[in-house]
Amino acid sequence: ISSSGVVGPNLNVALPLSAVVFHTSGKGILESAVAEALGGRFRTTLMEVDWEFRLSGGSNSGSSMSNDNGGGGEKEGDDVPSPATTTVKVEGFLSRVSHGRTSADIQYFYLDRRPVHLPKLAKTVADVFATSHPTATHARLQPAIVLLISGLQYHVNLQPDKRKVMLGALEQQLQDSVRQKCGEIMTRQTDSI
């Protein structure tokens, strides 16, 4: 999902004649990658998010890896962050309030397109999702999460698979910012039910 520009089939050699399970087109569009990997029908149960946060107390130099999200330059009149401010971009998809899963099997986080485990952020989103449901039955459902995060410094050399990361001092601010944005959009959806 994070490498939406990669073209190639996913072959299942357990099936006869190495049947193609799914094929990615490599369009370079996150929505297409999510629909191809998880299914077009499932994609309709997700809402798109595109947030930008300015977190204080960090540097804006990014991570130790390259930032693959491209992006344009600053426009005239934009607020230029101070050196003590980090601009963090969060884009992706979350379950709509009216949809959820009985397990947390579809919760994907990427830092600069690197797949990582962010259990605290997953819990933050799940808590907001649970409190947004009008009935207690739905409170046990887990949201599907596909979030690409860029602009943070982090340490990846904690485990050999490099999926465990340390975000440092900005982790709590990121959680609080995501909690606020999720609360806003999920409350609007709950009000419309």
Image (cartoon, helix red, strand yellow):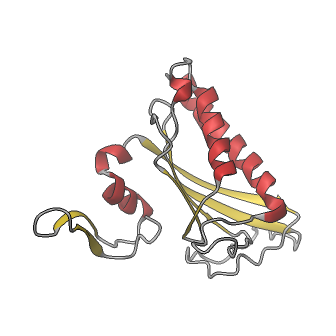
Residue shown at 21% from the left, 68% from the top: 13
Is residue 79 left or right of 99 when viewed as pictured? right
Residue shown at 69% from the left, 49% from the top: 120
Is residue 30 left or right of 87 when viewed as pictured? left
Residue shown at 74% from the left, 54% from the top: 174
How many dots with numbers? 0
Image vertical order of residue 136 relative to residue 61, above or below: above
Residue shown at 56% from the left, 19% from the top: 134
Residue farthest along the left direction in this orientation: 17
Residue 6 in percent (x, y) is at 37, 76
Q: Could you say which quadrant of the image residue 17 lies in?
A: bottom left
Image vertical order of residue 51 relative to residue 128, above or below: below
Residue 11 in percent (x, y) is at 23, 69
Image vertical order of residue 105 relative to residue 186, above or below: below
Is residue 168 left or right of 158 when viewed as pictured? right
- Which sits in the foreground, 126 or 150? 126
Is residue 184 at all visible to an observer of this figure?
Answer: no
Q: Could you say which quadrant of the image residue 32 lies in?
A: bottom left
Q: Quadrant of the N terminus?
A: bottom left
Image vertical order of residue 78 relative to residue 144, above or below: below
Residue 64 in percent (x, y) is at 70, 81
Is residue 85 at all visible to an observer of this figure?
Answer: yes
Residue 69 in percent (x, y) is at 56, 73
- Which sits in the foreground, 118 or 51? 118
- Which sits in the foreground, 113 or 164? 164
